[in-house]
Amino acid sequence: MLSAIERGRVPAIDFLNGEVVTHAARHGLAVPVNAAVVAAVRRLASGELRPSRELLDQVVEETRPKRPPPA
C-alpha cells in the first residue's frame, strides 16, 4: 500500500481491511485494529500524514486492549 501511495495511486485499503470493517459492522462486531489501520492509511493517502514509526506506534497504542488497574 505504501508503494501505491508513494506513486500517487489509491491504496487497496478499502478492498482489504475496509471489507473486514464493513462486514464486522454488519454483524455488530468491533474490529478496532482494522478500523485504525484503514483510517491511518486513508490519512496517509490524502497526504495528511507521512509514514513514520511514530504513526505506527500511535496505531498500536490506540488499539492496545486497556487493562483495568490491579485490585
Image (spheres, rainbow, N blue to C red):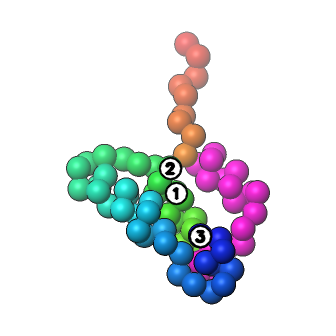
Magenta-highlighted stretch: main secondary structure? helix
Disc 3 residue type (three-letter): Met
Cα–Cα gap, marks 1 and 3: 15 Å
Residue marked by disc 2: 33
Task: Using the image, determine if residue 62 lies above or below residue 13.
Answer: above
Residue numbers of the magenta segment: 44-62
Mark 1 touching mark 2, by CB under 8 A?
yes
Instruction: Identify the residue at image location x=58%, y=22%.
Output: 69
Instruction: Give how far across and how far down residue 28 sits, in percent.
Output: 25, 48
The residue most toward the top is: 71
Q: Nearer the viewer, mark 3 or mark 2?
A: 3
Q: So how many labels did they put on this image?
A: 3
Classed neighbour count for the residue bearing mark 1: other residues with Cα under 10 Å, few (<14), some (14–19), many (≥20): some
Quadrant occupied by the C terminus: top right
Q: Which mark is residue 12?
A: none
Which residue lies under the disc numbered 1?
36
Residue visible at 57% across and 40% down in the picture? 64
Of 11 and 41, which appears nearest the observer? Answer: 11
Which kind of residue does numbered mark 2 sit on?
A: Val
Q: Give above or below for 5 relative to 57.
A: below
Q: Is residue 9 magenta?
A: no
For label 2, the SS is helix
Q: The N terminus is located in which quarter? A: bottom right
- Disc 2 residue crowd, few under 14, some 14–19, many 20+, Cα 10 Å: some
The answer to whether one can see residue 48 in this image is no
